[in-house]
Amino acid sequence: MKLKKLSYIFIVVVLSAFLFLSFIVDTFNVDAGCLSSVLKKVSSPFVLAVGIVFAMLMGEVYSKFNKLMSKKMLQYSVVALGFGMNIEKALASGWEGMLLTVVSVFATLGLGWVIGRKLLGVDSETSYLLSSGTAICGGSAIAAVGSALNAKSENLSVALAVVFVLNALALFLFPSIGSALGMSMKQFGMWAAIAIHDTSSVVGAGAAYDQLHPELVSSQGVSALELATTIKLTRALWIVVLVLLTPFFMKSHFANNVRGKAWYRNIPTFIVWFLLAILFNTYVLSNSSLLGEELANIGGNFSRMVADLAKHMITLSMFFIGASLTINTLRKVGLKPMIQGVVLWICVSAVSLAFIISCRF
């Protein structure tokens, strides 16, 4: 047991050190040489995998600490992410992006409920986490909704693992599919923003498509990367809406776990702070007419720094979540959540692709 605890502490310290260095390098544009390539590999999927492997080999260590850190760190990180969002820029994607966002979010949640609950019999908590991650922005949405639900660590681990695997696949598959179908920059940008879970993978796929077709960027006057990122930002704002609606969507969950509390008391405090952070960033920190050009630039840099810190904190929290996923827990969960995640992702990707091409956006 002593060896397990020492190993656990060693891994946490090493990961924290690497992520802190990564934050410094990314935020202040430090030239770290060959170390930069190493730091980039310390990503959320990698850290989650480290936690899962540790749990498989060593069993669960410091279980109470794991649950506390995964819950609190995720909540604080979600609030800090708000400083990286700007409402006005999100709305700049136009009516097409807004329409697709609204329709796809609710359609994905509904389809996820049918596939997960009705067809596969996945437990309500895991099914809802998977559907939320697919509908909005992957790991960030799962983190926010999971905190609102006070979700079990094993359910969070499974949902996050499924999303990260599909993110990696999308990063490689989407640019090739877009090229094969001859999609325009606008079409690919919209498709990537809707069908790929995490913003990082959306950015990667958009950049890859721009690099594959530089002639389209110049001839069409629009970049797949810029459009995809803007629409994805619009979708990310729906985290607030989804968390506020969670007590309605998951009435039975709250009835069983939070007896005697009115529905509005189930709205987590951190999501209120998240919304305030977005508003403060949009109308104060980044407002040049209020602060002046120079102070607004400083405020914008501060916002980006806080948002970057939040992303690194979320990455570290992946270890605590993964370290809670033991072999016994994995056996209890089974393959059904993975099937739900894959089938839901394929359906969303195929339907959104067909819609975008048929409407000739």
Image: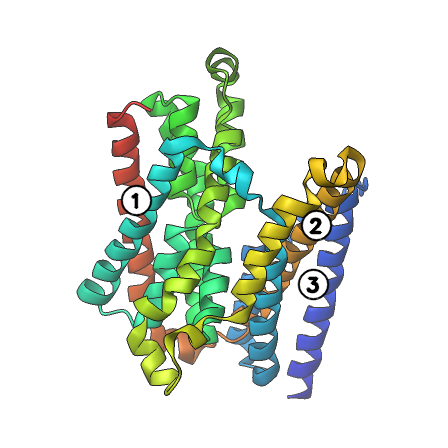
Which residue in the protein does label 2 denote? 39
Quadrant of residue 58 in the image? Answer: bottom right
Sooner in the amino-acid sequence: mark 2 or mark 1: 2
Residue 78 visible in this rendered orientation of the protein: no
Q: Could you tell me the amino acid type at mark 1?
A: Val
Q: Which mark lies nearer to you, 3 or 1?
A: 1
Residue 249 is situated, as x and y percent measured from the top left of the image, at 31, 66
Per the model, the C-alpha gap separating discs 3 and 1 is 39 Å
As helix, strand or loop, the secondary structure at mark 3 comes to helix
Sooner in the amino-acid sequence: mark 3 or mark 1: 3
As helix, strand or loop, the secondary structure at mark 1 comes to helix
Tell me whether the residue at label 3 lies in contact with that at label 1, contact meaning CB atoms closer than 8 angstroms: no
**Going 42% across and 37% down the picture, which residue do you hit?**
192
Per the model, the C-alpha gap separating discs 2 and 1 is 38 Å
How packed is label 1: few (under 14 Cα within 10 Å), some, or many (20 or more)? few
Tell me whether the residue at label 2 lies in contact with that at label 1, contact meaning CB atoms closer than 8 angstroms: no
Which residue in the protein does label 3 denote? 15
Q: Is residue 235 above or below residue 357?
A: below
Q: Could you tell me the amino acid type at mark 2?
A: Leu
Which residue in the protein does label 1 denote? 103
Q: Which quadrant does the N terminus fall into?
A: bottom right
Q: 149 or 114: nearer the eye? A: 149
How packed is label 2: few (under 14 Cα within 10 Å), some, or many (20 or more)? some
Residue 151 is situated, as x and y percent measured from the top left of the image, at 44, 74
How packed is label 3: few (under 14 Cα within 10 Å), some, or many (20 or more)? some
Per the model, the C-alpha gap separating discs 3 and 2 is 10 Å
Sooner in the amino-acid sequence: mark 3 or mark 2: 3
Q: Which mark lies nearer to you, 2 or 1?
A: 1
In the rendered view, does 138 fall on the left or right side of 286?
left
Q: Is residue 92 above or below residue 221?
A: below
